[in-house]
Amino acid sequence: MSRHSLEKPPLLARVRRFGVVSRLGWGVADQGVSSLSNFAMGIIAARALGSEGFGAFTLAYVTYAFLLSATRGVATDPLVVRFSGQPHPVWRKAVAAASATSAIAGVAAGVVCVLVGLLMPSEIRGGFIALGVVLPALMLQDSWRFAFFAARRPAMALVNDLVWGAVMVAALVSLLLTGHSGVTPFVLAFGGSAAVAALFGLWQSKVRPRPAWVRAWVTDNRDLGVRYLMENVSIGGARQLRMFALGAFAGLAAVGDTRGAEILMGPFLVILMGASQVAVPEASQVIRRAPRRLVHFCLALGAVLASTAAVWGMTILLLLPTGLGDLLLGEIWVPASALLPAVIVAFFMGGFEIAAAAGVRALGAARRSLKAQLTAAMLYVVAGGVGAYVDGARGSAWGVAIATTAGTFVWWVQLRRALEEHVNASSGSQAQPDRTDRIAT
């Protein structure tokens, strides 16, 4: 064997490692922009609206997050799992169908939000109606981000989020300067800026959404889509129910205080969510090359995320009491700061949970993923709701921390079992069929 042939594998391994680190870096940078934009939006809203107004805004926001998670289950989650790194023509067909699915889901969910909003109390009504108006744009913008990650081109997602963030912050500042601050204008600014980014995504991708392909997309990916829909609805619904329970048991101010504490962990979300966006495609590559190394990959990722959560949590506990916390959150700072220890514990364990979930999803083990997510969601809503009933915002925060710890253990058990099943079945596996055949007809 020649000297050059011996050198190629290590060189190839170094190139692959560099590529993984580079894409993870772009993913973190993209989420950094997204999280920074949401952080700025949260800070501006908290200071402008006060505890109760910010609580009403939070209820609209968590509803958006719930509907976004549901849409991802049928539209963009299958896109990332099945079409990451695929040839460009295959990717284009899949993106045309997935983006159209996201947009149409946004229209349907928007109509429901408007109708529900009309039945809401006056302090909540305007935010929900406004959310219904902007949901299609929010869903379409999110689909472009997933499309770029599936293409392993996270830099394009970063640029799109830069556009959204810049337009959103400009719109919010304009509202403050013109004296139009309120829940409804803030929600419209949030979604209206997403519409600008969604149009920009059309230009970036050079892909036109194809509504006629939606039915075939949902049908061909129903084995993953149905389970991911249930999975995402369960955890998204659990978060929403927890916040509504908190508002019912402790008032809108408690909802605002809880959201304020979560916002302070926003810079950590730069890494947590950025890594989660890229982790599934990268884990898929690990499975193709060396399946038994998946657990090591997930452990390493989880350790990095959890350590970062701990470092950032200690930093804000030490620095914000010096006066920076009051500067950022105003009247919300004092009650929000009391919730920080519990929130930090939840985010620490959440790092390991995100890593295990990425491994399970990369394996395409939708049944096990659904089982883990349903269990975690049940723990979340029960512990968060009971905690809210017993001790308001503080009880709910510690209940969520306990639930996240238990849910993380469940995810790792399912990852081990899914990997064993994959390894045992790999010898008789056959190539997956091209799932873009029907959407191209």
Image (cartoon, rainbow, N blue to C red):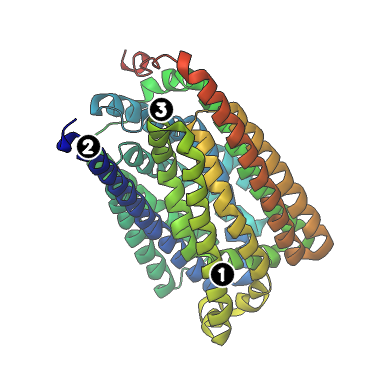
**Nearest to the observer: residue 407 or residue 142:** 407
**N-terminal of the two: label 1 or label 3?**
3
Circle 2 SS class: helix
Classify residue 416 by image quadrant: top right
Badge 1: how crowded within 10 Å, few (<14), some, or many (20+)? many
**N-terminal of the two: label 1 or label 2?**
2
Circle 3 SS class: helix
Counting from the top left corner in percent of width and height, residue 284 is at: 41, 34
Query: What numbered label is drawn on residue 82?
Result: 3
The CA distance from mark 1 to mark 2 is 46 Å
Q: Amino acid at mark 2?
A: Leu
Residue found at x 46% / y 34%: 77
Q: Amino acid at mark 3?
A: Arg
Disc 1 and disc 2 in contact, CB within 8 angstroms? no
295 vs 184: above or below: above
The CA distance from mark 3 to mark 2 is 33 Å
**Nearest to the observer: residue 373 or residue 182:** 373
| Residue bearing the label numbered 2 | 6
Name the front one of labels 3 and 2. Answer: 2
| Residue bearing the label numbered 1 | 313
**N-terminal of the two: label 3 or label 2?**
2
